[in-house]
Amino acid sequence: MLGAKGERLTETDRQSFLAGLEFFSHCKERQLGDLCRLAVERSLLAGAELCHQGDFENEVFVVLDGSAEVSVDGAVVGVTTVGEIVGELSMLGSGRRSATLRAVEPMRVLVFAPEDIDSVLSADPSSAQRLTRHGSQRRDPE
């Protein structure tokens, strides 16, 4: 369980959560610990934007709880789920957000700077393939 509503996660809780996600599954314990110390936990109220299409940003988010509506050019194209990595497309591409994410309920995310994610990619080349595949599937859903 991810702690009580409104309560920040401990580094241990963050580390356990990330260790259970495929993208981070090959990280060593020390690397996960470093990532957890660098990550910033952000809470959003229902209706708040996590990111806006077209903005120049390259932070990557991991959804801890809650969900966000994903829209492209004003049309809703999906909803995020707990444990999903979002925002990676701007890091992998032009640096511009390809979608707007708006919280449909109160939600919490971990925010990572691109260099934090780069450390995972450098340590485990297969993680780059998983992240690229994840982004490609969202750009071109089957």
Image (tube, rainbow, N blue to C red):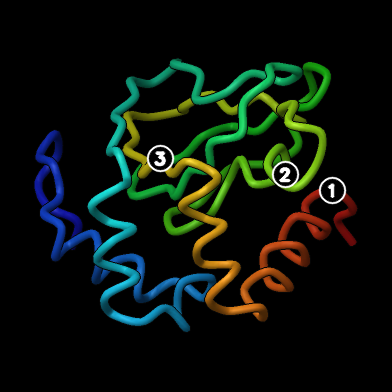
Real-space Cα separation, disc 1 to disc 3, in angstroms: 21 Å
Amino acid carrying mark 1 in the image: Arg
User: Where 108 falls versus 13 (above or below)?
Assistant: above
Q: Label for residue 108? A: none
Question: Residue 77 occupies which quadrant of the picture?
Answer: top right
- Residue sitting nearer the eye, 5 or 51: 51
Which residue is rendered at x = 50% and y = 62% of the image?
119
Q: Position of residue 131 (x, y in %)?
A: 67, 63
Which residue is rendered at x = 86% and y = 56% of the image?
141
- Residue sitting nearer the eye, 21 or 46: 21
Do the residues under discs 1 and 3 have CB atoms within 8 angstroms? no
| Mark earlier in primary sequence (1, 2) | 2
Q: Position of residue 120 (x, y in %)?
A: 51, 67
CA neighbours of label 1 inside 10 A, class few (<14), some (14 to 19), many (20+): few
Amino acid carrying mark 2 in the image: Leu
Which residue is rendered at x = 31% and y = 31% of the image?
42
User: Where 95 falls versus 82 (above or below)?
Assistant: above
Instruction: Give the SS element for disc 2.
Output: helix
Do the residues under discs 1 and 2 have CB atoms within 8 angstroms? yes
Residue linked to disc 1: 139
Q: Position of residue 123 (x, y in %)?
A: 53, 76
| Mark earlier in primary sequence (1, 3) | 3
Residue linked to disc 3: 111
Residue linked to disc 2: 89
